[in-house]
Amino acid sequence: MKIALINENSQAAKNEIIFNALKKVADTKGYEVRNYGMYGADDAAQLTYVQNGILAALLINSGAADFVVTGCGTGEGAMLALNSFPGVICGHVASPLDAYTFAQINDGNAVSIPFALGFGWGGDLNLEYIFEKLFSEPFGGGYPRERAVPEQRNKKILDGVREQAFKPLPEILKNLDRDLVKGALSGEKFDELFFADAKDEELIALVKELKA
């Protein structure tokens, strides 16, 4: 599994803390972590939580990432932004219990974490425990286990609804403000990471066009 980490500007200073907690857990599972930044508050590329949504959608839909970890001050804005795009199901995760139940019941592919609200002493440990429970078991197993079948059925229904509710991602990206999209793709290591991992040729070509 390839996990992408994305930070927006208000919480960029915590990138290293988040990355270290995520990588510590990912390494035990044999997962790879791709750090898309922001890497610090003074980065040249300043991402908003809306741009986190654009970037996350591109990474998931292109196959450059299988899972996205992101957030903002409260985690709410980033969650809403990610869920505005096709192919992305993002949960708001503030605790290890949130992480476990989201993974088992909702079987999503992204989480948004509050990196300011309630992030005090022991915040780094809470992050580590969140990632431990998030990736502790294969997703979609159900919780409680006797509810697994109806929960899996509901997830398939939700996927079908979302397929009808969204336009294709290339069409969405072409119709958004070009500077907004280009800003989301302007991170220091975006080109290095994205073009090495992306699999969807249409989206790869579109990114090259948008960045030209």
Image: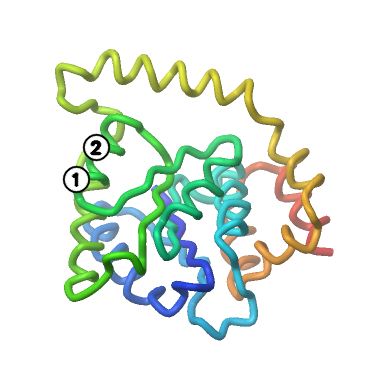
Q: Residue 97: give its label.
A: 1
The residue lying at 27 percent from left, 69 percent from top is 119
Closest to the observer, 65 or 17: 17
Image vertical order of residue 183 relative to residue 89, above or below:
below
Residue 148 rendering spot, x and y as whole percentages: 23, 19
Q: Is residue 86 left or right of residue 118?
A: right
Residue 10 rendering spot, x and y as whole percentages: 49, 73
Which amino acid lies under the numbered mark 1 shown in the image of this protein?
Leu
Q: Is residue 179 left or right of residue 21?
A: right
Q: Is residue 156 left or right of residue 187?
A: left
Alpha carbon distance from label 1 to label 2: 6 Å
Q: Is residue 19 left or right of residue 133?
A: right
Q: Which quadrant holds the C terminus?
A: bottom right
- What residue sits right under mark 2 in the picture? 101
Which amino acid lies under the numbered mark 2 shown in the image of this protein?
Thr
Q: Quadrant of residue 153?
A: top left
Asked whether the residues under the numbered discs 1 and 2 touch, taking CB atoms below 8 Å apart as contact, a structural biologist would say: yes
